[in-house]
Image: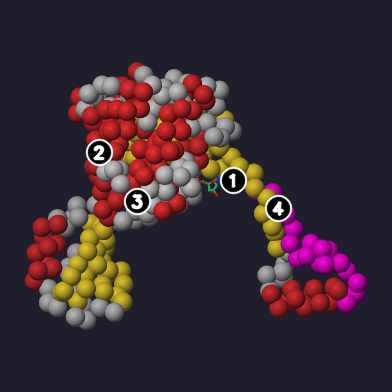
Amino acid sequence: MSKKGLTDIVPEDIARENPAVNAESVTKSFTRWQRKETPGGSDKENDSEKEAQGSRKGISWKESIRTIFRQEKKTVTALDGVSFQVGKGEFVAYAGPNGAGKSTTMKLLSGMLQPTSGTLSVLGMSPVRDRIALMKRLGVLFGNRTELWWDHPVIQSFEWKKVVWDIPDEVYQRNLDMVTELLDMGEIRNTFARELSLGQRMRADLGLMLLHSPEVILLDEPTLGLDVVAKRQMIDFLKRINQEEGVTILVTSHDMDDLEEMARRILMISGGKLVYDGSFDGLREITGNLTHFTVITDGRQPELAGCRLLGEQNGVFEFEVDLSQLPIRELLGKLSKAEGIMDMEIKKAPIELVIAQLYQTWKST
Ligand SMILES: Nc1ncnc2c1ncn2[C@@H]1O[C@H](COP(=O)(O)OP(=O)(O)O)[C@@H](O)[C@H]1O
Ligand SMILES: [Mg+2]
């Protein structure tokens, strides 16, 4: 495998020449049946009254239900004309709030879904048409799903994959050694999958996914639900395989903090549309550096000029501040002078707010 680090790569050039991932005007629509309530049907008391009346008049139970709810066909456009490229060796964050279309994109790239229109390719192959050939060079991890055999020790799933995927001995051994060491899997290997904590399960799934030396890996919400330590481990490991092994990584999350720690480039999606593609710094130039922080006091409200108070509960005050206007050093200076402060915590603005800022900036320009 190449030892090329991210610093040697100029992503823009490579992305254009020979992209690892290419999406052009991709649209994906789903048709969904959902029940439509008839007028007045939302009132529960009313419903049971109607039902009671219905049965008194000899109307069947099924018919009376049908009068309350009707099925309605609805088209959901999960992705709407999305185009982007990821160069070989890049580590790209795919961000967006819940329901934005992140998982749909990952499913399309791994051939689990077919686009309604537009074209997709991974390593020059079509995810649906060339699925088998592509799977040999691609790794996919959905954080909310496991590929491990639930009632077997982890190592058994690993050995099973070696056989089914026909992984050569030396490749298997080298990758097994690497993931065992870097993911601290010594103990986990012999544990039954169902007995693992979420963090351990995620590490085991990640290890399993890497056994066949994939060149491109797609990770959907791999940090979701992990505690601080498990998250740290996952992030450090991903950065390492990107830098040392040159693995191309596309990772989704709705947590900006996690993504910024890993990737240099961020694709942001909102309501199925790509709304930003660039660096984190570039994003901040547009949206400012909105940050939320909470301070715990003895009950007194701290006076912090330049910060907006969002709310207070039992002596915990939440503020919003734009760190591009009020540098962190000045904020800390103000906090050290304020009276009654016992503790504080800083958190990046939630992704919904960043997107709202993006839209606002566009509207005003
Ligand atoms: N199989 C499906 N059938 C119908 N609607 C779907 C299906 N999968 C996703 N959607 C809808 O598409 C939109 C995007 O979903 P998803 O890609 O899962 O978002 P995200 O991963 O960003 O939270 C949502 O409105 C979701 O309800
Ligand atoms: Mg999702």
Identify the residue shown where x is 44% and y is 20%.
Answer: 124
Task: Indicate the secondary structure of the residue bearing disc 1.
Answer: strand
Queried on whether the Cβ of the residue with tag 1 lies below 8 angstroms from ligand 1, the answer reads yes
Name the residue beneath numbered marker 4.
72
Identify the residue shown where x is 74% and y is 62%.
Answer: 69
Task: Indicate the secondary structure of the residue bearing disc 2.
Answer: helix
The image quadrant that residue 168 belongs to is top left
Queried on whether the Cβ of the residue with tag 3 lies below 8 angstroms from ligand 2, the answer reads no
Task: Indicate the secondary structure of the residue bearing disc 4.
Answer: strand
Q: Is residue 63 above or below residue 248?
A: below
Q: Disc 2 to disc 1, how far (Cα)?
A: 44 Å
Residue 54: percent from left, percent from top: 85, 73
Front: mark 2 or 4? 2
User: Is 46 in the magenta?
Assistant: no
Q: Residues within 10 Å of mark 2 (few under 14, many from 20)?
A: few
Residue 310: percent from left, percent from top: 30, 69
Q: Read off the magenta span.
A: 56-74
| First in sequence: mark 2 vs mark 1 | 1
Name the residue beneath numbered marker 2.
181
User: Is 63 in the magenta?
Assistant: yes
| First in sequence: mark 2 vs mark 4 | 4
49 on left or right of 348: right
Identify the residue shown where x is 25% and y is 48%.
Answer: 232
Front: mark 1 or 3? 3
The image quadrant that residue 279 belongs to is top left
190 on left or right of 272: left
Name the residue beneath numbered marker 3.
199
Q: Is residue 46 above or below residue 254?
A: below
Examine the rendering and report whether any part of residue 234 can be seen: no
Q: Amino acid at mark 2?
A: Glu
Label annotation for residue 76:
1
